[in-house]
Image: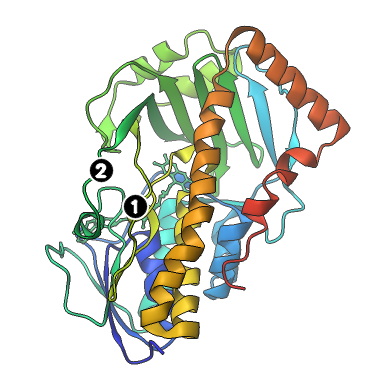
Amino acid sequence: MIARSHVAVIGGGIGGLSTALALAMQGASVVVFEQAPEIAEVGAGLQITPNGARVLTWLGLEEALQAKGLQAKAVVPTNGLTGRAVTRFDLSRQTPPYRFVARSALIEMLARACRARGVDIVLNHRAEDLPEADLVIGADGIRSATRGLLNDTAKARFTGQVAWRAVIPTKAAPEARIWMLPRRHVVTYPLPGDGLNIVAVQERADWADEGWHHPDDPAHLREAFADACGPLQDLLMQVDAPLLWGLFQHPVAPVWVTDRVALVGDAAHPTLPFLAQGANLALEDAAVLARQIALHGLQDGLPRYQALRQPRVQRAIATASANAVNYHLRGPRRMLAHAGLRALGRVAPDAFIGRLDWLYGFDATA
Ligand SMILES: Cc1cc2nc3c(=O)[nH]c(=O)nc-3n(C[C@H](O)[C@H](O)[C@H](O)COP(=O)(O)OP(=O)(O)OC[C@H]3O[C@@H](n4cnc5c(N)ncnc54)[C@H](O)[C@@H]3O)c2cc1C
């Protein structure tokens, strides 16, 4: 029912490109406007969990993901002060596989598939107004102007946390390691090739800016983790140009759709990175939106998309926010939590990941 309709997508990130592809596969004529001069993001990594991987398979990108991704074997919560693994939770039996991938590789495979489907990707084009089209997709990210056209402006709240990210040239086991320290944590995982993706989070009283791309002195990062165990300090010693950003909590937008506009991805529901779901949820949005339009047409499909998505993303965002608290515990609560995790790993090793069945087991394409 979207076939031959004109769709304009604002934003060529993961949400915009996956939605463009899903709609083009249904015969829509799609143009993507991206303000950046090229469709490329370098450096950082992403964890594509099974719920996101299912959408990529549906979009015909299973082989590309397999070629560009590294299959994750485990998540290893680790005491960041001693370096001892608290426990190890198996990921190797997840289907489709849980993968680590370079963000640039994912963007590139989506862009290539879009072009192969006839999607026109217009670079260096900042959309200032809603383009003329039967359907406009607002995929303009965390600072979405499209969200502001549909909703009253809601102020983002500083969470009291900042994060550094970096990739270092180190080979490591295909595991996500969560190094937990009082008031801080670091997540490390390998990328295809020999890169290790690092995101280090520290609690702080104040911060002015939300942008993702503030270069920082690596000495600040090392200073923040000066009491960490040797292996973690060794990794941080290899960081030479970290980017630092303040973590802000945005409310989920109350309104995602009008009769000809729909928000997807961070434009609708920015999340904190502590559950690795921002990109995965954007992929889910693309599939649910395209399917609802195919089943019910634009007029009914758009409100159905919002009604289906909002409760799920609220739950994912709440889970992500809670993770930071659990990783940063201090004193006796920290000891208790680690003992609990250790016991869980021994007695019911599948229970930890099993708690996330509602998340990883979801099929947005069904
Ligand atoms: C450190 C870090 C680690 C993360 N790790 C993970 C992870 O492991 N797994 C995961 O699922 N998610 C992860 N995320 C979250 C994920 O990256 C985002 O949620 C996801 O990229 C959102 O995609 P999007 O397309 O909605 O927005 P974006 O990727 O921000 O794309 C928006 C695009 O719109 C463009 N744009 C904006 N305004 C305009 C305009 N007016 N005109 C034209 N173009 C415009 C921008 O240039 C940009 O290209 C992580 C995030 C961070 C910060």
> Is 276 situated left or right of 175 in this image?
left
Quadrant occupied by the N terminus: bottom left
Q: Secondary structure at mark 1?
A: loop
* Residue 207, placed above or below residue 26: above
Outermost residue on the right side: it is 347
> Is 94 situated left or right of 49 in this image?
right
Identify the mark nearer the N-term, 1 or 2. 2
Quadrant occupied by the C terminus: bottom right
| Residue occupying the point 45% across, 76% down | 290
* Residue 277, placed above or below residue 155: below
Q: Label 1 belongs to which residue?
A: 253
Q: How many marks?
A: 2
- Mark 1 and mark 2: span between their CA atoms? 8 Å
- Please say if the residues under marks 1 and 2 sit with CB atoms less than 8 Å apart: yes
Residue 286 drawn at (x, y percent)? 45, 68
Q: Nearer the viewer, residue 149 or 8?
A: 149
Q: Nearer the viewer, residue 55 or 231?
A: 55
| Residue occupying the point 85% across, 36% down | 348
Residue 168 drawn at (x, y percent)? 46, 33
Toward which corner of the image does residue 162 lie, by quadrant? top left
Q: Label 2 belongs to which residue?
A: 154
